[in-house]
Amino acid sequence: MRIITHTCPACGTVVAANELEKNRVMKCPGLGCQEVLRFEHLPEDAREHFLENRDRYQI
Amino acid sequence: MKGVLLSGGTGSRLRPITHTGPKQLVPVANKPVLEYAIEDLKEAGITEIGVILGNKGRDEIQELLGDGSEYGVDITYIVQGNPLGLAHAAGCAKDFVGDDDFVMYLGDNILKSGVIELVKSFEAGDYGAGIALQEVDDPQAFGIADVDNEGNVTELIEKPDEPPTNLALIGMYVFSPAVFDAINDLEPSWRGELEITDAIQDLLEDDYEIDSHVVTGWWKDTGKPEDILEANRLVLEDTKLNTAGVVEDGAETDGRIGLADSSVIEDGAVVRGPVSIAENTTIKSGTYVGPYTSIGANSTLEDIHIENSVVIGDSEITANGRIVDSLLGRNANVESADDLLPEGRRLVVGENSQLKL
Ligand SMILES: [Zn+2]
């Protein structure tokens, strides 16, 4: 299973795509980091892959 | 070599203690379980550590560990979110790990021997992965490895009916970056998770050699209250304890006692080690603190007899009674009902608590 992550450009915290997709727009979970992370920040092919296989990234 | 430290999970078997925080922060001998893992990695020369966070306790874990500088390590946080399995957690660390090898350590595990030998054994050959094993009495209940004469793993079997060995996998692994290709090829198991054992099995099938290292000292998964008590006992048995605080004349002490410098054992109290007592705690007259007990910070004990127990901290325990084999969460208070009418116990007990009266 392809595992997709995004790295916060401000603090370096890595966030899994399932977390980004769940929230769509979220404050970075890095403590004290104010960066806003968006599912749209992922490359297009990663987003498409994730959405096509969305069920497998849930529990 | 990098480190990947898993700190997710719901901690459901440790409720109610984990209603308010992650299981990896439950203290053993007055130190959060997770700190033992950081120290083990550091001791093995691993200072770049990725800490995997689940859905629970993200802020608390970051507050404790910070950027790692207090521990002499450099921490990157990796938010896995949903618990999609150990292999998913490892996969989330791919960008962090890059082309390095890495140790994967389950943050609620604690083991006597650390990871130095596991890493050494892995680095002595050209392996795709290395796994830590321990001999168990009931191999049917574990994931079991079969190994050849050189200690190379030949097969992994989950809870076998006819186990080929009694060597169980414990939560400690070393991986080469080849594991990421294996993870990429994995499908979720019947329970909807990406299983790390499946990834190792794939490496085997791709002709990678898998090293094994048999851990001889104790190892404990601290998932349940009785495990916390046992880990506390094992650590107190092994750890150097330093009496920095005040032991008043007339206090009776023997055995090894860890006493923080701001804490006091008062005249008329009895403390028998091994015992650990954290900061700003007072053991008052009439109290007995018996072996294998850890008392957290900012607590007062009076009249109570307590042994083989963990008091996490911020507690007032002032009843005249015996507490044994117990785990008391932060801010839990135990007072006397002797002068209250009608006679009887008075309890305010949280969800999922367990009491034996
Ligand atoms: Zn950030």
Image (spheres, rainbow, N blue to C red):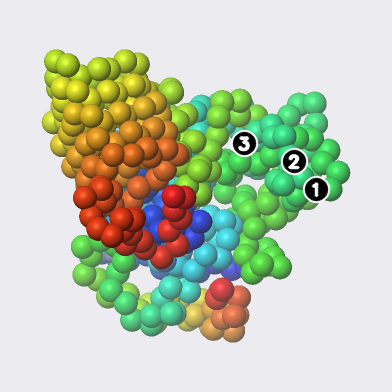
Q: Quadrant of ligand 1?
A: bottom left
For residue B160, the mark is 1
- Between B287 and B40, which is closer to the camera in this rendering? B287
Q: Is mark 2 in CB contact (under 8 Å) with mark 1? A: yes
In terms of secondary structure, where does tag 1 sit? loop
- Number of numbered discs visible in the structure rendering: 3
Q: Position of residue A58 (x, y in %)?
A: 55, 76
Distance Cα–Cα, label 2 vs label 3:
15 Å
Task: Classify residue A50 as left or right of residue B5.
Answer: right
- For disc 2, the chain is B
Q: Residue at x 41, y 75 (%)?
A: A20
Q: Nearer the viewer, residue B209 or B274?
A: B274
The answer to which quarter of the image holds residue B303 is: top left
Residue B97 visible in the snapshot: no
Q: Which label belongs to residue B98?
A: none
Query: Who comes first in sequence, dot 1 or dot 3?
Result: 3
The amino acid pointed to by label 1 is Pro
Please state which of residues B158 and B88 is positioned toward the viewer in this rendering: B158
User: Pointer 3: what residue?
Assistant: B132
Q: Which residue is labeled 2 in the image?
A: B139
Question: Is the residue B180 above or below the residue B302 in the image?
Answer: below
